Amino acid sequence: MAISPLQISIRDDNWLDSRKYLVILFTLGLFGDENILNLIREVKDKLLTHSGSIDLQHQLERDHLILPTIILHEIETNYTQVCLNTYGNYVCQKLISKLSASQLLRLLDCLSEDFETIAKSIPGSCIVSEMINASINEKNCEVSLLKMFEAHVCALICDSQGSHLLQQVVGLFDSNRSKFILDLIKENFHIIST
């Protein structure tokens, strides 16, 4: 018996976390669905444009079952460009609230590749801020995110966007978990202050 996409929960990790979402579409009998194929083609075109970004955000608000996986796959292939794009970053921010913990970890992996550049940019810092909020109750995500911050504390403290993110981490995470930020600032104060 085939599984209907309507029977699949939006938070079901087996559905949403497959990197090969096309295989899942095929398995569900949706691969040949013209609407799904059009959606896959459209996401790439819409992701970095004003009207396309608005459309994708509205579709994400409606808890579209397949769209988060398609967007996640597209973002993974070009994460830095999407994060630094005025319109792509809005889609990414909206997407973060729709992801499961394991999908969030995949996004964090992408973020780690160019963390400092993304965190220091205005659009990118908005995405990192959303990631911080989403990681609070997810232990593996929290650990991964804090490791990224630990590697870049000195560079971020000297940047307005970066220092805002550090303040957010210190304010939101347990003091024992975020204490390393203050410790690194104290250890490197002579470098940071010059």
Image (cartoon, rainbow, N blue to C red):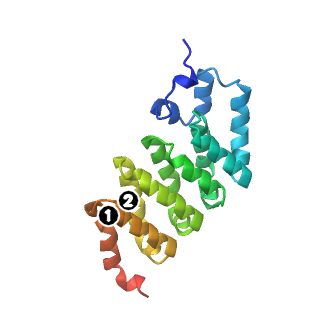
Q: What amino acid is at disc 1? A: Ser
On screen, residue 17 versus residue 59, left or right, reads: left
> To which quarter of the image does residue 177 belong?
bottom left
Q: Secondary structure at mark 1?
A: helix
**Where does the image place residue 130, in percent across and percent down from the top left?**
48, 56
In the rendered picture of this protein, how many numbered marks are placed on residues? 2
| Amino acid on which the number 2 mark rests in the picture | Leu
- In this rendering, the answer to whether 193 lies above or below 4 is below
Residue 190 horizontal/vertical position (percent): 36, 85
Residue 186 lies, with reference to residue 136, above or below; the image says: below
Element class at badge 2:
helix
Q: Which mark is residue 178?
A: 1
- Where residue 91 sits: x, y (%)? 61, 51
Task: Look at 66% across and 56% down and name the residue there.
Answer: 87
Using the image as rendered, state which of residue 22 and residue 69 is in the foreground. Answer: 69
* Residue 192 placement, left or right of 179: right
Instruction: State which quarter of the image contains the N terminus.
Output: top right
Q: Name the N-terminal-most of marks 1 and 2.
A: 2
